[in-house]
Image (tube, rainbow, N blue to C red):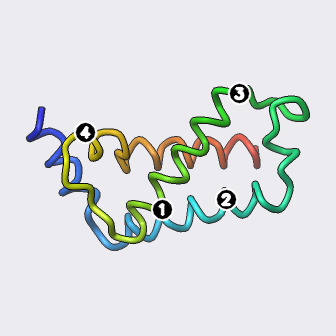
Amino acid sequence: MKPIIAKLYAVMDKGPLRALSLILALALAGMIFWDPSQFAAKTSEFEIWQGFLLMWAICAGVIHGVGFRPRRLLWQTFFCPLLADIVLIFILLMRFA
């Protein structure tokens, strides 16, 4: 399992992908700060679990975007940048589509 995570991080450890992660995460964080009612469970189509997923994706995107690389396999797996970017893109598409 460790080689898969290491290969995934090697693929995602590129400057443009880091910049993409950071831009996506900061854009969504800014949208949440600007109008939280768009993402609130009672005033939007988002469910509670989607809010937790959004917060995780923003945290993972910022961690990856600023260049921090977790040392332990557990944290590398938890803050997987590929999964976070997929979630960030999906939520942005939900907001603007």
- Left or right of residue 43, residue 84 in this image: left
Which percent across, then down, holds residue 9?
23, 53
> Which dot marks residue 34?
none
Neighbour class for label 1 at 10 Å: few (<14), some, many (≥20)?
Answer: many
Q: Are marks 3 and 2 in contact (CB under 8 Å)?
A: no
Q: Quote the CA–CA distance across marks 3 and 2.
A: 17 Å
* Residue type of the residue flagged with mark 4: Leu
Q: Position of residue 75 (x, y in %)?
A: 29, 45
Q: Mark 3 to mark 1: distance in Å?
A: 22 Å
Instruction: Give whichever of 11, 32 is nearer the camera.
Output: 32
> Label 1: which residue?
62
> Where does label 4 land, which residue?
74
Q: Is residue 42 left or right of residue 19?
A: right
x and y percentages locating residue 19 in the rendered image = 44, 71
Assess whether mark 1 and mark 2 are in contact (beta carbons under 8 angstroms): yes
87 vs 35: above or below? above
The residue that label 2 is drawn on is 29
